[in-house]
Image (cartoon, rainbow, N blue to C red):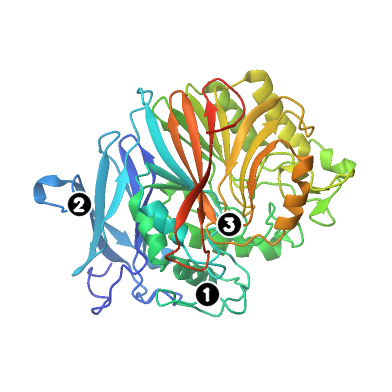
Amino acid sequence: MRPANAALSGADPFTLGVASGDPSPNGVVLWTRLAPEPLTGNGGMPDYPVQVNWQVATDERFADADVVRAGSVWAEPKWAHSVHVEVDGLLPDRVYYYRFRFGPHLSQVGRTRTFPAAGSSVNSLSIAAVSCQSFVAGRYAAYRHLAARDHDLVLHLGDYIYEGKGPDNPPAGPDRRHLPYVTIWSLEDYRIRHAQYRLDPDLQAAHASAPFICVPDDHEVVNNAAGDYGANGNSTPEVYLPRRAAAFQAYYEHLPLRRSAMPDGPAMQLYRRLRYGDLAEFSMLDTRQYRTPQMDGPTFQPLDPAAYDPDRSLTGPEQERWLLEGLVASQARWNVIGQQIYMTAIDMDPGDGQSYNTDKWDGYPAARSRITSFLHERKPRNPIVLAGDVHAAMVNDITLTADPTSPVVTTEFLGSSISSGKGNNARFEAALPQNPQMRYYNGRQRGYLSCEIGRDLWTSDLWFVDDALDADSPVRRLASYVVEDGRLGAQPA
């Protein structure tokens, strides 16, 4: 080990901001990464560990009397000098402030919050859900708006970065730093791509405003990733798994994840459960790492009989069993399934035929049927599904079968993408008359979802950016829907 300050000159090492995540009643993960030259593979850091100090306080001014926890941690080059501090010994249901020090440099101050004590009576919870933030497709006005509001928790439901080539003329601006936006493969590539996103001041502000719970979708590795076989099964494990190992490592290095999520080569433990007193339980899913490859052929197609094979899975049998057993055992008033892709059956043929998106739950009907049948028969209290991926805002009543007139078993909410565009919006709009279970749809605007959760009522607000290319764009609430305790289905607020 070398002394803490031996590596750096006067350059700011905290260029990528700070973050917190995965709260518990007595603690939270604190994150930062030392990167004085963030758009280089090693971030401008030396090839040896350095020591980083951290503090947690009850007041953002960090007076000595207000500092309740402090310590130091080694930032190692193996993990790109990222820091994941698992603080414990905090009080339940409290706001805390945190910061890091390296040599003479102080990081910005982050705000976080612990969860209420397990089983304690809780009356309210404010959350936001976000996804799909292509750096070259638009600006982060939605994050600017989110950061200014008082959320207890933010769920990131995937596509934190995009691995592919972007538009030839991405939006420019004084607070953006662009690199050639080409397809990435190596650990260095993924690190630089994450850093490129993390330099955005509005994304940094959102992370500093509240704790995040993060699960990746596909673009953190490669589009339409499926199990060990890459995109749509069109790659061998020998080719794909080293790429996933690099992507998973960079994902861990840039997000506030616990040590239990530290990747082991191409494997990463991502599905997990978090409890917010007696009010809400969050079951966060991984719908990419264990899935069966998509059906051959175009993305939208009538389902071949082989699609109904019960061995085809999105989650893998172990995770599916974990989900259902957790829902059976839950004592929470609201049971939230946070995952990446829409679960609702949506027939995309505007006529008399059928056409389903084989990358979504529609491409795995037997797996979805096991979950919807479970919800219908076992009736866990107030299940709510949150999703992202599709670059559109939706309010969907999930039904027992693909027939939209079958019984409703739960409601699904999707905020629009933070910035990623929707190229197939016209197809979705044309299919709306065939899909009455889609209670609300907007694929034309970018934005996010916020939810106010009470004991008797769940309220979802859909926020939209006026101009996705303007970082200072106004953000407006255009729709609100509610779900009542004990009553299935969404209603306009």
Packing grade of label 2 (10 A; few <14, some 14-19, many >=20) is: some
Packing grade of label 3 (10 A; few <14, some 14-19, many >=20) is: many
Kind of residue indicated by mark 1: Pro
* Residue marked by disc 1: 171
Q: Position of residue 401 (x, y in %)?
A: 77, 30
- Residue 414 shows which numbered tag? none
Packing grade of label 1 (10 A; few <14, some 14-19, many >=20) is: some
- Find the distance from the CA under tag 1 to the CA under tag 3: 17 Å
- The residue nearer to you, when weighing 257 against 487, is 487
Q: Position of residue 75 (x, y in %)?
A: 33, 63
Establish if 169 lies above or below 133: below
Instruction: Say left or right for 11 vs 336.
Output: left
Q: Position of residue 256 (x, y in %)?
A: 40, 52
Point out the frontmost of discs 1 and 2. Answer: 1
Mark 1 element type: loop
- The residue nearer to you, when weighing 137 against 281, is 137
- Find the distance from the CA under tag 2 to the CA under tag 3: 36 Å
* Residue marked by disc 2: 60
Q: Quadrant of the N terminus?
A: bottom left
- Earlier sequence position, callout 2 versus callout 3: 2
* Residue marked by disc 3: 445
Instruction: Say left or right for 104 vs 352.
Output: left
Kind of residue indicated by mark 3: Gln
- The residue nearer to you, when weighing 237 against 127, is 127
Task: Name the residue rendered at 29%, 41% in the picture.
Answer: 88
